Image (cartoon, coloured by chain):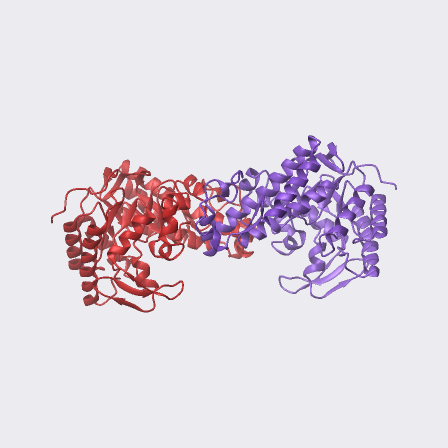
Chain colours: A purple, B red
Amino acid sequence: MGETPAYRARDFSFAVEAADGRARAGRLETPHGVVETPCFMPVGTKATVKGVAPRDLAALGARVVLANTYHLYFRPGAEVVALHGGLHGFMRWPGPILTDSGGFQVFSLADTRLVTDDGVEFSSVYDGSRHVFTPRLAMEVQERLGADIVMCFDQCAPGVLPRDELVAAVDRTTRWAAACREAHGRRDQLLVGIVQGGVDEELRRRSAAELLDVGFDAYAIGGLSVGERGDEMLATVELMDDLLPRARLRYFMGLGDPVGLLEVVRRGVDVFDCVLPTRMARTGTALTADGRLNLRNARHARDLRPLEDDCDCPACAGFSRAYLRHLVLQKEMLAAQLLSLHNLRVLIRLTERARAAIRAGAFAEFATSVIARYRAGG
Amino acid sequence: MGETPAYRARDFSFAVEAADGRARAGRLETPHGVVETPCFMPVGTKATVKGVAPRDLAALGARVVLANTYHLYFRPGAEVVALHGGLHGFMRWPGPILTDSGGFQVFSLADTRLVTDDGVEFSSVYDGSRHVFTPRLAMEVQERLGADIVMCFDQCAPGVLPRDELVAAVDRTTRWAAACREAHGRRDQLLVGIVQGGVDEELRRRSAAELLDVGFDAYAIGGLSVGERGDEMLATVELMDDLLPRARLRYFMGLGDPVGLLEVVRRGVDVFDCVLPTRMARTGTALTADGRLNLRNARHARDLRPLEDDCDCPACAGFSRAYLRHLVLQKEMLAAQLLSLHNLRVLIRLTERARAAIRAGAFAEFATSVIARYRAGG
C-alpha cells in the first residue's frame, strides 16, 4: 500500500512519542500551538463552544477547537470571518482550530439534495436558498476561514446503508479527496483525508488505499458512530489502525462518550470531537466517573455534594448538586455554562490521564478500570 | 422628625466619607465585606445573575448581589438554601447579598390577590397554589435565606394610582414596617425600611416620618421608576434627601439606566439595582458611553471594533462587534454572557467614576458631561 510521502503543510509535525499496544501518545505541532494526544476537541459549531468563553475553554485544558464550515459559510459568511484574519481573530481562540468540510451537514441537514460526481446541490437550512458545494468550494471556504486543520469534502455513508450506496460514497469520497488535494493551496493548513466505507472491510481497505495514494498529512475515520453496531465500529477502527500509517495523526470524527473514547484510543486513534458534552449540559446532564447524572432527578434536591469530589473544574469548585439542579429546573443559563465546563473537563481530563497511562505502559488496566466504574454507575 | 437612634444590626457600619452637593461617597461595612458607594448592585433573582458566574461578577467589580425572596421561597424553597448555610453558600457569592422582601412580586405577578391589613393572599406563579405573605413570614424567609441586607415587606404603590390607594399603601407600609422590625431577629442582618408615597409630597413626608419613627439601619426609596414622570421622580428623590438622615444608607429600588443612575446619585442616593443590564444583554443590546447599541443592526455586520475602545470588560477584550452580532443573531448563549459582562461593567464603572468625581468635588461636571454624551449618542 503506497503513500505519497511528502507533507505538504508547513509548520506542522506529528510524532508518536509513546505507544502501549495500539494506543499512542503523540505530539502535534501547529502554527497556533502544540497538541498532545490523545486529545478531545470541543465543538464550536458556529465559532463558539456553546456557553463557554475562550479563556474558560483554555483553562479547562482544551487545545483544539472545531468550527463548522457549512454554518459559517451561511452565517456570517466566510468573508466576514476573513475580515478578522480568520477564525482565530473572529472567535478569539488563540490555539489550533479545525474546520470540518461542511459535507456532513450538506448530507444530513438538507431535505432535498442532488448528489452528482461534482458535488452536492442542496437547500440552505437558513433560508431555503439553493446552493452547490463542491470539493473546490469546500477548500476555498476553509482557506478563508483560516483554521489550522482542514477537512476534505467527503460523503459520510453510514454502515447501515445498502452496499451499492456505500460503494458509490467511497468512490465519490476518493475522487473528491483528490480534488480537494488539488484545490487546496494554503500550506499553513493541515489537510486531512477522510476514509469511508461503513463497516465493510473490503470498502474500508479500498478507501484507505485510495486516500493513501492521494496522500495526506493526516487521516480521519469517517462514517462511524452513525448507527452501526458497537462491535462493528470497533472492529473497523482496529482495521483502520492496521491500514493507516503509524506516523500520521488519526482522527475519529464525532465521538464523545467516555467509554467509546477509551475504546478508540485503545485502537490507535489520536483525536476526536463531539457535541455531546455541551449538548448534554444544556439538558441538565453531567458526565461523571460513575456514569451520567441527570440533575432533574429529585434525589439531588438536597444534595450538598459537588458533581464530583475530585474534579478540578469551575462547577465542582463549591457549587452543590442541589444548586445546579435548581439552576437546571429554573432554566437558568448558568446551569448550561457550569455543566458545559464540567463535562468538557471530564473528557479532557480523561484524555490527559489516558496519555499518562500510555506513557507508563499501563493503558489497558487504566481503560478497563475507568470503563468498569463508568458502566457500574450508569 | 425623630429617629430611633440605635442600630440594631451587628457588624455593620455606614459612613459618608465625602459629599459634593447632595451627592455622597460612602462606605458600608458588612459581615461579608466592604461596599463603597455609590454602588450598582447586579440582580440575581433566582440566586444567579443570569449568565454570569460569581467569579466573573467579582472580577467586574460587583460588590453586592441581589436575590429575590418570592422566587426563592417557591423554588427551591428557603429550607434548601438554608441547608447550604444561606445564599452565600448556595450561590457561591462570597460578598454581601441583599434580598428583597417578595412584596413587589406578590403585588406585580399575582393575577388574583387579596390584600388585608395583615398581609397578602395570592396565587404562586409556579403552580397557582394559594399563599399568604405577611411581614412576619417575609422576615422568617429572609432570615433563612441569610442575606446581609434584608428588606421590609411593603406595598409598592406607583405614583399614578388614585390618592386614596396611595394613602392606604403608605399606611399599610408603615404598619408592616413596624411588624417587620418586631419580627426580625437576626442581628447579623441589616434591615431596611422602605418609604412609599408615590410622587405625593405630603405622603412621602408622612411615610418617611413614620418609618424614621420605627427606626431602621438604612432606608429605601420605593414606588419610584414605576410609571411616573421623570421630573416628578427626581423631585421626590430630592425630597427624600431632605427627609432621610444623612448618616443612613439610601437605596433606590430598581434603577439601572446610566442617566437615571447619575441623576439619583446627584440627589443623595447611595445604592441601586436593576435587571436592565442583563435583560438588555439577552436581547442583544449593549450599553455604551454613546447610548444603547443594538447589535442586530446590519451596520455592525463588518465592524471590527470592540463595543467600546476604553472598556476593560471581557467582551471588549478583543471580540468585535461583528462577532458579537453573529452570536446574537445565531442565539448563541455566549452573546448574552459577553453582553451581560459588558453592560454590568459599564454601570459598575460609572459608579466607580462617580465616586471618584464626588471625592474630587467634581461630580456636577462629571455627571453633566456623561449624560450629554450618552444622550447625544442614543
The reply to whether residue A184 is visible in this rendering is: no
Residue A95 drawn above or below residue A140: above
- Residue B337 lies, in percent from the top left, at 48, 49
Q: Nearer the viewer, residue B261 or A313?
A: A313
B351 sits to left or right of A68: left
- Residue A171 lies, in percent from the top left, at 84, 54
Residue farthest to the bottom, as pictured: B112
Residue at 64% x, 45% y: name it: A258
Residue farthest to the left, as pictured: B1
- Residue A47 lies, in percent from the top left, at 60, 49
Q: Nearer the viewer, residue B10 or A55?
A: B10
Q: Nearer the viewer, residue B295 or B163?
A: B163
The answer to which image quadrant residue A7 occupies is: top right
Residue at 21% x, 43% y: name it: B248
Residue farthest to the right, as pictured: A1
| Quadrant of image for the C terminus of chain B | bottom left
Residue A362 drawn above or below residue A230: above
- Residue A275 lies, in percent from the top left, at 62, 50
A197 sits to left or right of A38: right
The total of numbered circles placed on residues is: 0
The reply to whether residue B63 is visible in this rendering is: yes
B378 sits to left or right of B194: right
The answer to which image quadrant residue A37 occupies is: top right
